[in-house]
Image: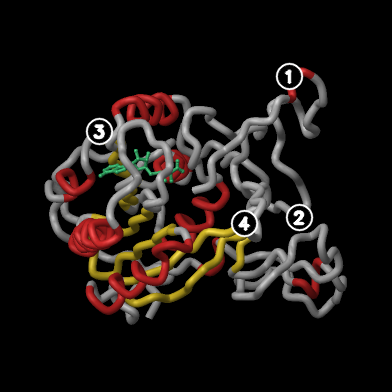
Amino acid sequence: MPRNGIRTPKPRAAGLPLDRVHRGDCLALLARMPAASVHLAFADPPFNIGYDYDSYDDRLAADDYLVWSKRWMGEVARVLAADGTFWLAIGDEYAAELKVIATRELGFTCRSWVVWYYTFGVNCRQKFSRSHAHLFHFVKDPASFTFNTDAIRVPSARELVYGDKRANPTGRLPDDTWILRPQDLPEGFAADGDTWYFPRVCGTFKERSGWHGCQMPEQLLGRIIRASSHAGDVVLDPFGGSGTTLAVAKKLDRRFVGFELSEQYAKRIEQRLGAIRTGDALDGAAEPLKSVPATKDGRRLKRGPSATRRRTKAR
Ligand SMILES: C[S@@+](CC[C@H](N)C(=O)[O-])C[C@H]1O[C@@H](n2cnc3c(N)ncnc32)[C@H](O)[C@@H]1O
């Protein structure tokens, strides 16, 4: 049964200080954490596609990548509480294999295979432009896990599209529906799907930190953290990146612990965490269909010499 609102015992004190990022290799740092000390883990690892990180070479032989992935996911399973949750963000290249490892070999149960559809994906010339990533919602125990339904309800199509008075005023849970972009099918697009409609954090957005190409939107992490943890729970991110998970955990009053291999990124994460307070609003538009993310120049991108487009490498 989902532990809706029912707190499990507090996790044992973590072996590493909480509420900060630790610089180093996640395998070494995970090994220093006691078993069952984390409620929610969110991981957005390198996708092994040759992405250009500061200090990590994203080009392992496929078999090595799978062995390494099994090792760190196994450590995540160990440090998770018995009713803990593990969200994994991954690209097409290894999504299927990592799901099999997580479920068949490490014992996780997959509650949802969420497709994150994002606008502003990188334009491809010889294939369909990629506009999605996979978000696996794994739990350790399918009979006991956190799922805060009231924290993640969305307006229903009945309410949004049809103005139907029978619409439940509290909305509905996001579901698993294939969607098209609003500009492709304005009358058929639904915001409430488990194909989640959040724009990538692109170069022009005010939210963009500007120093990490894989920054995830705060609103995306907001949904995950609100759904899968309670205030005061411990949230872990083994691949800190720009620090989005940790920043959102702090804003939402969770304890947190993050790891990051790059010294440069880890320092920037510390600065990001130092600049925010618990209770601060999340960056980005909560309802992308009703509002758009602000650009640094205001709502609209200004044309002119300063509007040179940044090219972001596909990941
Ligand atoms: C895809 S990015 C994470 C982006 C993050 N979700 C965000 O929103 O900014 C992956 C990060 O993992 C880091 N990394 C790679 N190998 C690592 C390791 N063994 N231990 C810790 N961090 C690692 C990389 O330096 C990179 O910053």
* Residue where numbered disc 4 is placed: 131
Identify the residue at the far top of this view. Answer: 305
* Residue where numbered disc 3 is placed: 23
- In the rendered structure, the answer to whether residue 206 lies left or right of residue 67 reads right
Amino acid type indicated by mark 3: Arg
User: Residue 137 appears in which quarter of the rendering?
Assistant: bottom left
The tally of labels here is: 4
**Does label 2 or label 3 sit earlier along the sequence?**
3
Say whether residue 206 is visible: no
Q: Are marks 3 and 1 in contact (CB under 8 Å)?
A: no
* Residue where numbered disc 1 is placed: 306
Counting from the top left corner in percent of width and height, residue 130 is at: 60, 56
Q: CA distance from mark 2 to mark 3?
A: 38 Å
Q: Are marks 3 and 4 in contact (CB under 8 Å)?
A: no
The residue shown at (34%, 71%) is 139
Q: CA distance from mark 4 to mark 2?
A: 17 Å
Work out whether 310 lies above or below 63: above
Q: Which mark is residue 289?
A: 2
Amino acid type indicated by mark 4: Ser
